[in-house]
Amino acid sequence: MASKIATFRLPENLIQEIQSRAEATGRDRTAVVIEALKQAFGLPPSEPRPATVEEVQGHLNQLEKRFTTLTEQLSKITEKLYSESRISQSSPAYKQAMSVPESAAPLKAVRIQHQTFGVSSAGSEELAGRDRAQAASQELPTIADAFLAGEVFSSRTRGVGEGGAGQSKASEIDSPKDKQDEAELQELAARIDQQARIFDQVLSASPDPICVLDRMGRFTYVNLAIAQLFGLQQRYILGKTWQQLDLPLEFMEMEPLDAQREVVFATKRPLTKEISYPTINGMRDYECILSPILGVSGSVEAVICTARDITERNQVEESLRESEANYRHLFEYANDSIFIIDLSTGRILDANQNGARRLGYTRKELLKLKTRDIDVAIPEARQKMINQQMQATGSIIFDHALRRKDGTEIQVEISSRIIEYRDQLVSLSFVRDITARKQAEERMRLLESAVENTQDGILITEAKQLDKPGPELLYVNQAFTRITGYDLTEVLGRTPRLLQGPKTDRSQLDKIRIALSQQQPVQVELLNYRKDGSEFWVELNIVPIANKSGQVTHWVALQREITERKQAEAALVESKQQISKILESITDGFFTVDPEWRFTYFNQKAEQILQRTRTELLGQNLWGVFPELVGSTFDREYHNAIVQQVTVTFEEFYSPLNKWFEVHAYPSCEGLSVVFNDITKHKLGEQYKE
């Protein structure tokens, strides 16, 4: 589209409005005028370039500086007026102007953003009308309301009257300079009001939540973003603290920003804090910057808080940290030796611990060396061939020999690749000792020998199916045939379930099935049956075997016969039952405690004598249940028995039950056994005889 240059003469107030819009939107004035003309003539508007967060923040900072400058100018002018009015207080005209009826008292307070700096009652009446109209419309306060809350001016000290005679008398003392100052004040107030509106528009357009808090923690300004975050209306939030808002419980429990706000008020320095806030999309992280808003006197009038959603940033940083940690972990704990080598100098830039250990160096020593210090010399032709392939393909695998610190040599396989590392080309080399590979066959032979000669049964099955008929047996060792009575040819191709019978615990079989379905190892104890039908107990350990791709292909089971142990356990249980029957039938009270003084046994007679049930005592600490025993003869004798490992016998009166007891305490490695009897009648008889 062709363009032409045109010159316009515009009123001053229109030029100011164009300039304000240009600053608020980040465009030049010509663009603002063109856009307005397009709208006036019905032409389609051009697509605006979306403002970035940084641009909005920049505009916000500029507007804040200009707003502060205008406020300081306003303060200076009002102070000047105040001084001049003090000089004129002695004049008869001033006294007459100030002696107005009570009904025509001056306005108490005038807020800056309403342009209330007039020196005549007419201006005051016009202001009062605008205040009533604005209060009726219930509009939200602008950012200027939040910044200048409390910045009010007494109209009495300015000579501002209201109505009747007060108006005419106030006018009598107006001088040309007063009228000039009044005009300056009104112009300055208009500029502040205009800047405040622009400031508020910028904050409302910000995607970041922004609010202003007073010294009591009340919200005096909130932009649209924070209202949407809270899920509340802006009007509802204003004048309240965060405790008075219906916010999520998780947020309320954090007491957000209270301490930081108080610090900012005290120190006049900005602070930063990260908080988390629950939303419908999950918990979000915010970086909150609290900055002081200073008044004309230099004191902190309020705190402005800007919150930026840093959830994604934190997630990225956490991912980077995890990635770096995982890389370092893999680098340090890899089984292979890893070297990073400068291709131009041959210097070792980095090496893992395995690399240093296998060569007999500390890592610090190794990083001072070059490859020639650890290489075993090879023919020049072969070295040339390695270099050529490395340059042509960027990678190579070859067998080589390295020299340890003690001078001995090891045969290795080196896998090298050219990579970019810290802005330079390096060789990333994985070095594997192939001595182990050559020893693998010997180890396999030894393993087979051990498997065949072990006293525990070993069986291997496939890992194909768990349902009937079950996994198929592929191998059993000689110990398995000895324990079960089955020959190798009788079990191959069959399932281990052939060993199960009527008394095999179904719950243990279910445990095995769950573990196998999850490809997890499992250990159980089972009652199985031999070929001749006799029962035997086994401790069965089953582990999965995976192939190179990680797929489980086989199960290996170690079967250890524990029949004798089970029989001994059964005998022990029977013995304990018999002992328990005896202890329950004796006429003495009996209890046992472990080394931590916790009750482990409490017979029926002890319940009757001490009037406490075993249910409430078992597992409880003796001194916690009977605190009155602490420091008594019982305490001293019991501890003496434990410390000296001697049997103690004593008689003692127990005041809570008003009874005398004869006590025998027997220490053991399992704690203390106590036999006691109520001898109160015997004691009373002795006292009666005396």
Image: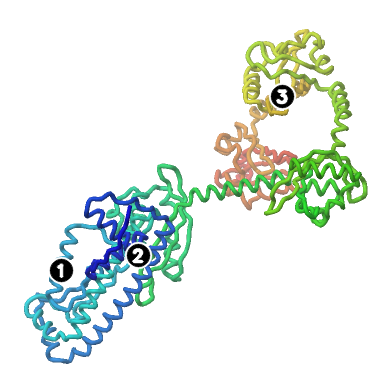
Is 382 placed above or below 144 here?
Answer: above
Work out whether mark 2 precedes mark 3 in sequence or the reverse, and give the earlier one. Answer: 2
Depth check: give the residue in front, 4 or 307.
4
Q: Which residue is mark 1?
A: 128
Q: Amino acid at mark 1?
A: Ala
Work out whether mark 1 precedes mark 2 in sequence or the reverse, and give the earlier one. Answer: 1
Work out whether mark 3 precedes mark 1 in sequence or the reverse, and give the earlier one. Answer: 1
- Residues at circles 1 and 2 in contact by the CB criterion of under 8 Å: no
Is 534 placed above or below 605 here?
Answer: above
Q: Few, some or many C-alpha atoms within 10 Å of disc 2 (few <14, some 14-19, many ≥20)?
A: many
Is 450 placed above or below 635 here?
Answer: above
* Secondary structure beneath label 3: strand
Q: Percent from the top left, x then y, of residue 249?
A: 40, 48
- Residues at circles 3 and 1 in contact by the CB criterion of under 8 Å: no
Q: Which residue is mark 3?
A: 542
Q: Amino acid at mark 2?
A: Asp
